[in-house]
Amino acid sequence: MPRLAVVVCSLFVGLGSVRAAAQDLPPPSVHADCSVQLPAGFDAARPTPLLVLFDADAAALAIEIARAGFIVARPASPPESLGPNAFDGLRAAFVIDQGAMHAAASGDHVAGAVPAVLRNRHQFQTLTVWGGAAAADVAAVQKLHARRVHVLGEVDGASLREHFRRLHAERRQAGAAAAVDAALDAFHEAAAKGDEARYFHLLPDDAVFLGTDASERWTGAEFRRFAMPYFERPSAWVYVPLQRHVEVADGGELAWFDEVLDNDAYGECRGSGVLVRRGGGWVLRQYNLTVPVPNELARGLSQRIRAFVDGGAKTATAVTTVILVRHAEKGGEGLDPGLVEAGERRAARLATLLRDVPLTAIYATEYRRTAATVAPTGQAHALATTTLPAHEVRPLAAALREREGETVLVCGHSNTVPAVLRALGVTSPPAIDDAEYDRLFVVTIDAEGARLLALRY
């Protein structure tokens, strides 16, 4: 019997127990390709904690956790197939308390859940696993800053329910800071929902917004004019708060804060600023958005910034060229099939196409089909293939950026190639259909950003 089935059986004895547990809850519904169990008394306008449970069959467990006041979403698709935008629909459908989601998985589901969380790291503040999972299984998530990861031992429904209740409460502000916390959450939520009126009510005309570029100092009114095109979209931008510190001055009329945010394009960011009480609520007087730089990278980055300022974009850095392809046609059973004859022909065609391209490195995922796709090209250029796990999109992007001025080839999958494009700075990477094996993307990167050329071969 699968591990999760053992857990579920220990929670409920017979269908009658499940019905008894669910009698005070709304029936399950479907949102964003997930089965969603809402808590009792759910109010769509009220922020509610949201937990993604990576087990499509764990309806009884979803009921138990929902009784702790959570929205519990169970993706219908297996975790391995969930791309980097898999949970955007949940964010659009609900007002998520604290802004960031929780993730949970048990036993055999952990292996697929961890890569799915990493591909969507900007969405999640915690990960909890149990049912035989070990610390080594979640080590990659533990490396992320400001994420809380828990590996539990023996559990039952009641202990899990209380665990998630306590976990969510850990980030809850107390006393006067709670209202400040709620205002900041509403600020980020308004941007995610494209709600211009609510966003600029919290950032009024006489406020100051400091952006990540040294030139970006706007009044609230100026920032509103700049941001109007973004708020014409369903979502202006999504910055998910993961950690926050709030201080309220004596008298309760002034507060200041700093927070850790994650954004799909810019990665980990830091927000800080000042709020004042006005009209019975809190509004921002200043918001300062920055991108923290690890000390190990600061010297090199400062030199690039100085070169950019002194010499302009064209002389600041050399141009890096990244060529990305999906693996060629695959065949056979199992998780790691090789190439079929058509795929072998395509791999040879790729080597011919890139014969005169000055490649300096080749990257592929750990699967046979990607290695076989780039093997003829590697032989033609006398280059060994560097293997990186398919889910490690950001480490790969970081490695590619370090190869400044070089030309490299990357072979991935239909869901990872768009994720790598996004991590390299392509704002709207094209999707790849399951039946498409001929897409070839050329990304050129310099100090002005990333540019994409989409081809077929």
Image: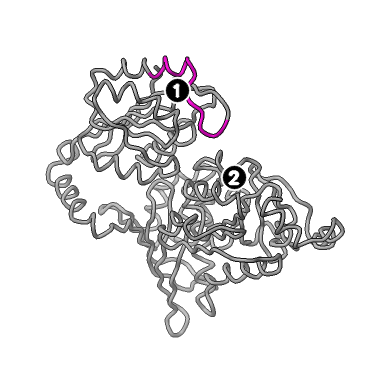
Q: In this view, does 69 lie to the left or right of 229?
A: right
- Residue designated by label 1: 328
Identify the magenta region: 334-347
Which residue is at 47% across, 52% downward? 122
Q: Alpha-carbon distance for marks 1 and 2?
A: 30 Å
Mark linked to residue 89? 2
Magenta span contains residue 408: no
Extreme residue toward the left, this view: 310
Q: Which amino acid does label 2 sit on?
A: Gly
Instruction: Give the percent coordinates (x, y) of residue 351.
Output: 32, 19
Instruction: Give the percent coordinates (x, y) of residue 345.
Output: 42, 14
Q: What residue type is labelled 1?
A: Ala
Earlier-in-chain disc, 1 versus 2: 2
Which residue is at 65% across, 51% downward? 73
Q: Is residue 182 left or right of residue 383?
A: right
Q: How crowded is mark 1: few (under 14 residues within 10 Å), some or many (20 or more)?
A: many
* Foreground disc of the pair 1, 2: 1
